[in-house]
Image (spheres, grey):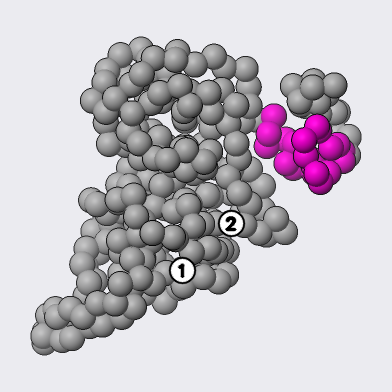
Amino acid sequence: MGVRQHLAVAAAMLTAGAVLAISPPAMAAPVTVQQLAQTVRTAPDWVSPGKTLKFGAKGSVVKSLQARLKALGYMPGSVDGQYGGATQTAVWAFQKVNGIKPTSTIVARTWRALENPKLPKVLVPTGKPTRAEVNLSTQILVLYVKGQIKLISHISSGSGIPYVEYATWNGTRQKFSGDARTPTGTFKTTWRRTGWHKSYLGELYNPIFFNGGIAFHGALSVPLYPASHGCVRLPMHVAKVLPGLLGTGVPVIVRGSFQR
């Protein structure tokens, strides 16, 4: 039986409420009900347009790309047929999850991956059903809600380059220094602010703090490498919606290490 047949059977059994422990071909370990449900959800039949797309493109092919990314949990912005910055960051996130070097140009390899997408690596398989996982190695954020992927986003974490900066804070000019690292570990979301929040190291958009002064926040620059003082930068359109999806007291798991 092929993988598609396994998934079809799994989907039917899940609907019937069966408990499964199926091992499809080429998979070493049994697959849990939750994993099968997620795979079925993210792998519907879809045929790619197959046309090369570049940043700035417009039209129905771009709209198809955006709709596919959105269906898989990525955030391409409005499904409007315009390949802009929001769609580009969603493409980057998808490519990183699927082992493709991030690029704004969509060619055959990315289209094939969109037809048969991989799931993001689960950092804590036994984690809470609702949690945020930050993979520093791939620079990806995955938000799980009730055991299902709700959002996958490109990020830029701490650069790891020590800094010394001076800023006026509480009425006096002060010196601030640090190692610019995003610490690994397990944390929980705490306080947050709406809109632009001024910190001693710059402006943060819709920050959600989870480890002291380290937060998820929107930024105007979210490059393809770690570049922050330690926070987890998000594309602005992702930061606009994240506060409505990520509550207070939600586990945040940070793992990995970026290799330059």
Say which residue appears at 67% left-offset and 53% top-offset: 129
Residue with the mark numbered 1: 210
Q: Residue 260 lies in what quarter of the image?
A: bottom left
Disc 2 marks which residue? 131
Q: Considering depth in this image, is 91 or 51 the residue closer to the camera? A: 51
Q: Earlier in the sequence, mark 1 or mark 2?
A: 2
Total tally of numbered discs in the picture: 2
User: Does dot 1 land on a helix, a strand or a loop?
Assistant: strand
In the rendered structure, find residue 253 and report the number of the disc placed on it.
none
Using the image as rendered, state which of residue 38 and residue 229 is in the foreground: 229
**What span is colored magenta in the figure?**
20-40
- Is the residue 138 above or below the residue 229 in the image? above
Q: Position of residue 123 (x, y in %)?
A: 62, 57
User: Which residue type carries mark 2?
Assistant: Arg
Image coordinates of residue 11 in percent, x first then y, are 78, 27
Residue 213 left/right relative to 195: right
Rendered image quadrant of residue 106 = top left
Whole-angstrom CA distance, mark 1 to mark 2, is 12 Å
Answer with left or right where residue 259 lies relative to residue 179: right
